Amino acid sequence: MKNNMLTLGIETSCDETSFAILKGERKVLSNVVVSSLKEHKEFGGVVPEIASRAHLETLLACLKLSLKKAKVSLKQIDLIAVTRGPGLMGSLLVGLSSAKALSMALKKPLVGVDHVIAHVYSGMMSDPKLKFPFLGLAVSGGHTLLIEMKSPSRYEILGRTIDDAAGEAFDKVAKMLGLGYPGGPEIDRLSRGEDTNKFFFTRPILTQDSLDFSFSGIKTAVFYKVENLKKNKPLSLRDKKALCAGFQESVCDVLVQKSVRAAKTRKLKAIVVGGGVSANSRLRALFTKAGRQENLKIVFPDMSFCQDNAAMIAGLGAALHREGRQKDGLELSAYSDFNRRDRRGN
Ligand SMILES: [Fe+2]
């Protein structure tokens, strides 16, 4: 296989339509992302039917733009990598059908890629010095997972959330406080420079050696605190900011503590923090501090890999193809739930 092979990545798992062209396994020639977020805002969350239709409308223009930016033609593409899950089923099927059609028309191999593993794998694309094995924390609106990454195709799940995903808790708390959607960036912004102890929320550690997460308890604690404060007078901006800071500190603290525990237990020297919540500035600060204290290498993939994007899909797809462990045909199916992926869902 060529070292400079061109991989076309396709990502349509949620509300972002993305096409990317990758040269080799790291050089991103283009990474076009078009979001339908604006169309979902009034509903306070992603509406699956709207997302699927938006993908259909945007898809062809995205593909053309990704080729134009990369200065390559479709005929030059060597491999097609596509997200097959987890995500919204309708949205996934738009991308998957397009990938199959392109694979058939161009007579090029097709590789199905797991979106969550790609978020963690993107650490390899951002940091050339990063080596397997490493610990991955995938943290987003849909997932909170601790994964031991042994190779592009071999990994082991060490811990997961037993209720809400971290990003989901951010969205729900933002809604309680009357902030916009998505909640993560708003809470991050309002928390800056605030006292994190004015409203202290207990860290849900579960059992001492558990690597699982639970965020619904913090969310409920914020709810009762808000209700209590509102009994006397409407919630002030000052209180909102302090509530954001206290809540964010609790979530980030747990994410860091459990990741460090997992890395030490498995004797892993590096942690990659991937997914939408990895853009949170407090999470980055706490991980950086913990990395220094515990002598762990902390990798935050480039910001462009934090949001949903096709470059990371192309990257993992190219690595899986190199390993020769995965060759997918037209029977390739989508899965909405990470737990329902089959053995090729990596
Ligand atoms: Fe994602």
Image (cartoon, grey):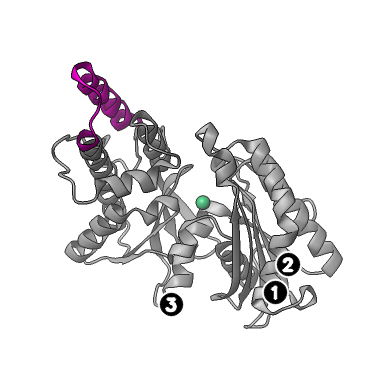
The dominant secondary structure in magenta is helix
The x, y position of residue 107, in whole percent, is: 83, 69
The x, y position of residue 166, in whole percent, is: 38, 41
Q: Secondary structure at mark 1?
A: helix
The x, y position of residue 277, in whole percent, is: 40, 50
What's the residue at 52%, 39% (across, down)? 41
Kind of residue at badge 2: Lys
Are the residues at dot 1 and dot 3 in contact (C-beta closer than 8 Å)?
Answer: no
Look at mark 1 in the image and give the residue it sits on: 68
What's the residue at 60%, 78% (across, down)? 24
Kind of residue at badge 1: Lys
Kind of residue at badge 3: Pro
Q: Which residues are magenta?
A: 216-239
Look at mark 2 in the image and give the residue it sits on: 64
CA–CA distance between discs 2 and 3? 29 Å
> In which quadrant of the rendered view does residue 39 lie?
top right
Q: Is mark 2 within 8 Å of ligand 1?
A: no
Nearest to N terminus: mark 1 or mark 3: 1
Q: Which mark is residue 128?
A: 3
Q: Callout 1: few (<14), some (14-19), or many (20+) C-alpha neighbours within 10 Å?
A: few
- The one nearer the camera, 157 or 116, is 116
> In which quadrant of the rendered view does residue 167 lie?
top left
Task: Using the image, determine if residue 174 lies above or below residue 98.
Answer: above
Task: Using the image, determine if residue 20 lies above or below residue 76.
Answer: above
